[in-house]
Amino acid sequence: MHDGTYLCLTELLDQDLSAYEYFQGLDGRVQDVLRREDGDVSSLEQLQSRVAVLLASDFTE
């Protein structure tokens, strides 16, 4: 069984259906920021935490 930690966002989304579904439900601008930061997210918990930070800030492209 996998421990839920992956090398990067791309691998996480490829291997974890819950993370993939969560990511697909996000606003496109948030998805774009996360894709650019691919190596910074390696678990669903990190993904959710990063999204919370982005949504709490006034991020711009």
Image (spheres, rainbow, N blue to C red):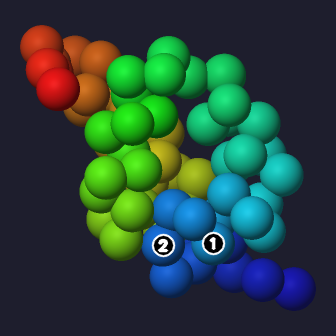
Q: Is residue 6 left or right of residue 61?
A: right
- The percent coordinates of residue 57 (x first, y second) are 14, 19
Q: Quadrant of residue 24?
A: top right
Q: Residue at x 75, y 64 (%)?
A: 14
Quarter of the figure that contains the C terminus: top left
Q: Quadrant of residue 43?
A: bottom right
* Residue labelled with disc 2: 8
Q: At numbered mark 2, what does the secondary structure look like: helix, strand or loop?
A: loop
Kind of residue at disc 2: Cys
Q: At numbered mark 1, what does the secondary structure look like: helix, strand or loop?
A: helix
Mark 1 surroundings within 10 Å by alpha-carbon count, few (fewer than 14), some (14 through 19), many (20 or more): some
Q: Is residue 49 visible?
A: no
18 and 1: which is toward the camera? 18
Q: Residue at x 76, y 36 (%)?
A: 21
Mark 2 surroundings within 10 Å by alpha-carbon count, few (fewer than 14), some (14 through 19), many (20 or more): some
Instruction: Check contact, mark 1 vs mark 2: CB within 8 A.
Output: yes
* C-alpha span from label 1 to label 2: 5 Å
Q: Is residue 36 left or right of residue 5?
A: left
Q: Residue at x 73, y 46 (%)?
A: 20
- Residue 26 vertical placement versus 5 (above, below): above
* Residue labelled with disc 1: 11
- Residue 38 vertical placement versus 31 (above, below): below
42 and 10: which is toward the camera? 10
Q: Residue at x 38, y 22 (%)?
A: 29
- The percent coordinates of residue 58 (x first, y second) are 12, 13
- Residue 41 vertical placement versus 30 (above, below): below
Kind of residue at disc 1: Glu
